[in-house]
Image (cartoon, rainbow, N blue to C red):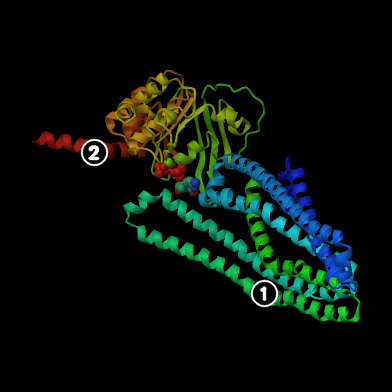
């Protein structure tokens, strides 16, 4: 019921229209009983009545009126049905539109932790299938329920005005029908929740397969993936059939009860006509409206099925709606300051769901310094830099930017001061120009080219079919890993932020290109604190300071020379990376 309240809130702006639709439904369906009533008058007066022949000649006007009335009411009902459907469609579509925007904003506003826990396929299912199901329910299922109910009630009231006893005889069947329907609903509910989950799994598999197509091809795992998909597909199909077939267990009972209405009407109604309790016309009215009582009983299964699906989908959407990100923008109207770019980690520890990743890390970076971070894979480098723009929050300790705890800063302001090139490069399906200017859509073209140059990307960009207007990304021209990294670097440089974070951004470029990039970074035309994660000593050597992470701990800190002198991890890496060169030199020397 809480979900219905939620829907009602979201109908805001279209509530009047929706209520109009509901009212039109009620009026339109109540009119269903008018024609049987006219039919009853015609039968009683002109066909089966005592003076039928007499009336046929004397009251021809009345007969014509009644016939015209029948046609008129039919037309009126058709017109009303048209109007009603239009109102349902409009209000539900408007609601869908609003909810979709809201949900989209919600998803956009979620923090990284949310994305760690929610599958893309599942979110996509919510944004498409579930939303459509909810709209369909608002427009069609609720309409069907309201109309069935109105027709049922109108028919029963009409029956009562004709003959209460006969009506009661007919209604004897209702309680058992409701009991059967209730048992059915209870049994089928978990099935639809399960069905919804399987659909989401199917979508997730599909989405991952499409996104990961290259890997699948590379490992020649198509067959395995097809099987995996087939498996999910069968699961979904089975669950669908199971839910649909449950209905068959109950269908014979409900159908028999529905048929029972006719039998009771024939037996009891026949007797009543013979006794003269009701007229033949009244019997005809009963007979022509008995469907209004039995059909809702027949349809109860379909209605229950749809309601269960409706709630299964609705609860999923409501989940997104009420999902609260832990890391939020307070939206205090602050002027966006430009930071100096001082960064401090003060006894910072951090953990994901499963165990500590950073352990008691403390260091300071002055404005304008260049810091390199090195460490074996999985040592926590990415996790560490993720704390600066507050992609995640620390578990213990503080991260300070310009001396202020990042948790006290406005997210917009904080992130607006950081340029970042993340480790997994994502380019949008857009032009190269659009990708570089992503953080600043007003970037003049000369600047785009300038930053592409600094990132050593200009040369390969101009060789592309349409230069800076070449579409890249998922559906565009393919780029090499190193090319993507360089465009991502240009994108990070182009925003002119006082803090620049590069996560393994030159890992895929050759040494010569790397040299060019380092030179660019040294000569940036704006003041900037740089944090560079790198594996190569050639990159780290020129940093003001180098931090070495090992298993989440800061084990070494100092300049290139200091760390070499220390003969620790950094020294080992240095030796390892220079060993090859060293050996070559030696061999050469011997010759
Ligand atoms: N981890 C996790 N959940 C995430 C991301 C990482 O549990 N969403 C774990 C995996 C590692 C540890 O945290 O055990 C550190 O991961 P990092 O990505 O911080 O490691 P690095 O960036 O140092 O590794 P690499 O050099 O491979 O990028
Ligand atoms: Mg990393």
- Seen in the picture, residue 572 relative to 136 is either above or below; the reply is above
User: Percent position (x, y) of residue 214?
Assistant: 36, 49
| Label 2 environment density (alpha carbons within 10 Å; few <14, some 14–19, many ≥20) | few
Position of residue 230 in the picture relative to residue 97 (left or right) = left
> In this orientation, which residue lies closer to the viewer: 518 or 361?
518
User: Percent position (x, y) of residue 137?
Assistant: 67, 55
State the residue position of label 2. 579
> In this orientation, which residue lies closer to the viewer: 485 or 261?
261
Q: Secondary structure at mark 2?
A: helix
Q: Secondary structure at mark 1?
A: helix
Whichever of labels 2 and 1 marks the residue nearer the N terminus, that label is 1
User: Percent position (x, y) of residue 508?
Assistant: 33, 37
Position of residue 289 in the picture relative to residue 133 (left or right) = right
- Seen in the picture, residue 313 relative to 433 is either above or below; the reply is below
Alpha carbons under labels 2 and 1: distance apart: 78 Å
Q: Is residue 567 visible?
A: no
Which image quadrant: the N terminus? bottom right
Residue furthest front as drawn: 57
Q: Which mark is residue 250?
A: 1
Residue furthest left as drawn: 591
- Seen in the picture, residue 451 relative to 320 is either above or below; the reply is above
Position of residue 248 in the picture relative to residue 383 (left or right) = right
The residue at the point 44 percent across, 36 percent down is 428
> In this orientation, which residue lies closer to the viewer: 588 or 182?
182
The residue at the point 77 percent across, 57 percent down is 29
Q: Badges 2 and 1: C-beta atoms under 8 Å apart?
A: no
The residue at the point 87 percent across, 68 percent down is 45
The residue at the point 54 percent across, 49 percent down is 124
Between disc 2 and disc 1, the foreground one is 1
């Amino acid at each position: 019921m809480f979900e219905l309240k939620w829907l009602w809130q979201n109908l805001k702006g279209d509530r009047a229209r929706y209520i109009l639709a509901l009212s039109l439904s009620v009026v339109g369906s109540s009119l269903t009983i008018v024609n049987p009533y006219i039919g009853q008058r015609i039968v009683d007066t002109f066909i089966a009545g005592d003076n039928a022949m007499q009336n046929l000649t004397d009251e021809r006007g009345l007969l014509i009126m009644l016939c015209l009335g029948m046609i008129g009411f039919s037309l009126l009902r058709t017109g009303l049905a048209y109007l009603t459907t239009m109102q349902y469609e409009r209000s539900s579509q408007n609601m869908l539109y609003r909810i979709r925007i809201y949900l989209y904003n919600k998803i956009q506003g979620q923090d990284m932790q949310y994305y760690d826990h929610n599958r893309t396929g599942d979110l996509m299912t919510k944004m498409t299938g579930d939303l459509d199901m909810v709209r369909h329910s608002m427009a069609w299922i609720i309409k069907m329920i309201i109309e069935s109910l109105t027709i049922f009630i109108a028919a029963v009231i009409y029956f009562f005005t004709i003959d209460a006893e006969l009506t009661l005889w007919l209604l004897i069947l209702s309680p058992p029908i409701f009991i059967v329907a209730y048992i059915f609903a209870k049994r089928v509910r978990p099935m639809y929740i399960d069905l919804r989950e399987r659909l989401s799994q199917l979508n997730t598999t599909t989405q991952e397969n499409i996104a990961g197509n290259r890997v699948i091809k590379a490992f020649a795992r198509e067959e395995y993936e097809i099987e995996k998909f087939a498996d999910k597909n069968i699961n979904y199909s089975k669950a669908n059939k199971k839910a649909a077939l449950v209905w068959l267990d109950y269908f014979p009972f409900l159908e028999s009860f529905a048929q029972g209405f006719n039998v009771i009407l024939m037996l009891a109604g026949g007797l009543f006509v013979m006794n003269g309790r009701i007229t033949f016309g009244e019997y005809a009215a009963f007979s022509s409206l008995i469907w209004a009582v039995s059909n809702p009983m027949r349809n109860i299964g379909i209605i229950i099925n749809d309601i269960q699906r409706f709630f299964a989908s609705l609860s999923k959407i409501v989940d997104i709606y009420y999902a609260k990100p832990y890391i939020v923008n307070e939206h205090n109207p602050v002027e966006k300051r430009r930071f100096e770019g001082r960064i401090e980690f003060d006894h910072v520890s951090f953990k994901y769901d499963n165990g500590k990743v950073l352990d008691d890390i403390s260091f300071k970076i002055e404005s304008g310094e260049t810091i390199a971070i090195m460490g074996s894979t999985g040592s926590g480098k990415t996790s560490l830099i993720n704390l600066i723009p507050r992609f995640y929050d620390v578990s213990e300790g503080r991260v300070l930017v310009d001396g202020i705890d990042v948790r006290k800063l406005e997210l917009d302001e904080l992130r607006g001061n950081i340029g970042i090139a993340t480790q997994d490069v994502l380019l949008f399906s857009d032009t190269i120009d659009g990708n570089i200017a992503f953080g600043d859509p007003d970037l003049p073209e000369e600047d785009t080219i300038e930053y592409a140059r600094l990132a050593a990307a200009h040369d390969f960009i101009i060789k592309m079919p349409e230069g800076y207007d070449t579409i890249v990304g998922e559906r565009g021209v393919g780029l090499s890993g190193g090319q993507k990294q360089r465009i991502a670097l240009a994108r990070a440089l182009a925003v002119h932020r006082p803090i620049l974070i590069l996560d393994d951004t030159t890992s895929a470029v050759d040494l010569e290109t790397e040299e060019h990039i380092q030179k660019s970074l040294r000569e940036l035309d704006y003041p900037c604190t740089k944090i560079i994660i790198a594996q190569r000593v050639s990159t780290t050597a020129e940093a003001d300071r180098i931090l070495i992470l090992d298993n989440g701990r800061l084990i070494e800190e100092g300049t290139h020379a200091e760390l070499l002198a220390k003969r620790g991890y950094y020294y080992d890496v240095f030796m390892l990376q220079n060993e090859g060169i060293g050996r070559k030199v030696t061999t050469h020397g011997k010759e």
